[in-house]
Image: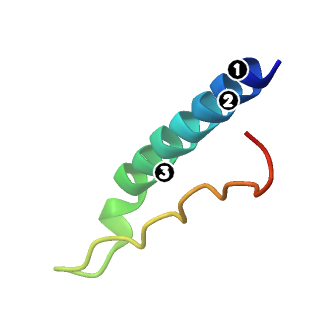
Amino acid sequence: MITEQHDTRLSVAEACKELAEALEHLTAHDSPAGRAPPRAPEPRHERGTR
């Protein structure tokens, strides 16, 4: 059960990272010249769970 939760969290974190990269790519043309779009926040980790 714990391993499944850990694997699920890793999968969700990876999906969030990929989504952030896709959004960055899609919104890059809307950014002012010389400035990159803001980065998405890192996924939060729950305390007290493993």
**The label number, if any, that marks residue 6 in the structure image:** 2
Q: Position of residue 38 (x, y in %)?
A: 42, 73
Report the Cα–Cα distance between label 2 and label 3.
21 Å
Amino acid tagged 2? His
Q: Secondary structure at mark 2?
A: helix
State which tag comes first along the sequence, 2 or 3. Answer: 2
Amino acid tagged 1? Thr
Q: Quadrant of residue 22?
A: top left
Report the Cα–Cα distance between label 3 and label 1.
26 Å
**The label number, if any, that marks residue 3 in the structure image:** 1
Q: Position of residue 8 (x, y in %)?
A: 69, 26
Q: Residues within 10 Å of mark 3 (few under 14, many from 20)?
A: some
- Quadrant in which the C terminus is drawn: top right
Q: Residues within 10 Å of mark 2 (few under 14, many from 20)?
A: few
Q: Are marks 1 and 2 in contact (CB under 8 Å)?
A: yes
Q: Residue furthest left?
A: 34
| Marks 3, 1: nearer the viewer | 1
Of residues 40 and 35, which is closer to you in this image? 40
**The label number, if any, that marks residue 20 in the structure image:** 3
The residue drawn where x is 16% and y is 79% is 34
The residue drawn where x is 51% and y is 35% is 14
- Quadrant in which the N terminus is drawn: top right
| Marks 2, 3: nearer the viewer | 2
The residue drawn where x is 79% and y is 45% is 49
**The label number, if any, that marks residue 34 in the structure image:** none
State which tag comes first along the sequence, 3 or 1. Answer: 1
Amino acid tagged 3? Ala
12 versus 35 height, above or below: above
Q: Residues within 10 Å of mark 1 (few under 14, many from 20)?
A: few
The residue drawn where x is 64% and y is 23% is 7
Of residues 31 and 3, which is closer to you in this image? 3
